[in-house]
Image: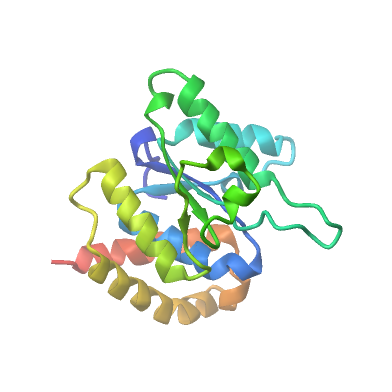
Amino acid sequence: MTKQPGYHDSVFLNCPFDDEYKPILRAILYTVYRCGFFPKTALDEDDGTDYRLNKIIRKISDCKYGIHDLSRIEVNINGYPRFNMPFELGIFFGAKHLGNTKQRAKNALVLEPAKYAAQQLISDLNGIDPQAHNNNPENAMRQVRNWLRTASGRTTIPGPEILNRQYHEFNKGLPAVAHALGFRVDEINYTDLVNVIEDVVSEQLNRTP
């Protein structure tokens, strides 16, 4: 990362990191960077002496914006749902409504895999109006782009056609970039993926008239 982003440029990303979700994760990460923001997650740090929850709280505190995808709240093979992402969303809401003036400026986008999926498990979300991406990366990309444009008011955010075209260009070149790093696309880890996206976006911006 070429600079340390400030509070108003940082987006806390609360989402799955499993293989099935990777296409949506790439689309969201690319959109956040291309719109001029910086994602932050607990995966940014790797310190075995630091509690994961402490890292999450620090990241949330550092970010004005948050993207919360509640795509893994279905029950597992043992009949239990995963509550990590709803829990982190709750911390974000708490920071917004109980924190100082800076924290009260927080703004969140809540995503779900299908319309009304989250509200069936978390009735307190009624009235929040989560956005359903239907497991489609382009839907997620459009929703993140539109939310960032509205929430930030920034006129530098690219329109959907430019964003789609440049994202497809990034995806087309990703296998070669991953190969040069010694990965297959489905093997590239989070840190390397973030670095690749930063480099590609920087290159695209340098040649955008």
Residue 185: x, y in percent? 56, 76
- State how many labels appear: 0
60 over 45 or under it: above or below: above
**Would you say residue 183 is visible in this rendering?**
no
Where is the C terminus found, in terms of image quarters? bottom left
In the rendered structure, the answer to whether residue 120 lies left or right of residue 28 reads right
Name which residue lies at 52% across and 70% down. Answer: 23
Residue 5: x, y in percent? 38, 40
Residue 108: x, y in percent? 43, 41
135 over 124 or under it: above or below: below
Name which residue lies at 62% across and 43% down. Answer: 122
Residue found at the far left of this picture: 209
| Colouring | rainbow
Q: Quadrant of residue 123?
A: top right
Question: Camera-side residue: 27 or 6?
Answer: 27
Residue found at the far top of this picture: 100
**Would you say residue 57 is visible in this rendering?**
yes
Question: Camera-side residue: 102 or 77?
Answer: 77
Name which residue lies at 38% across and 74% down. Answer: 170
Residue 184: x, y in percent? 59, 78
Q: In which quarter of the image is residue 8?
A: top left
Question: Camera-side residue: 159 or 123?
Answer: 123
44 over 117 or under it: above or below: above
In the rendered structure, the answer to whether residue 68 lies left or right of residue 204 reads right
In the rendered structure, the answer to whether residue 50 lies left or right of residue 31 reads right
Name which residue lies at 24% across and 62% down. Answer: 205
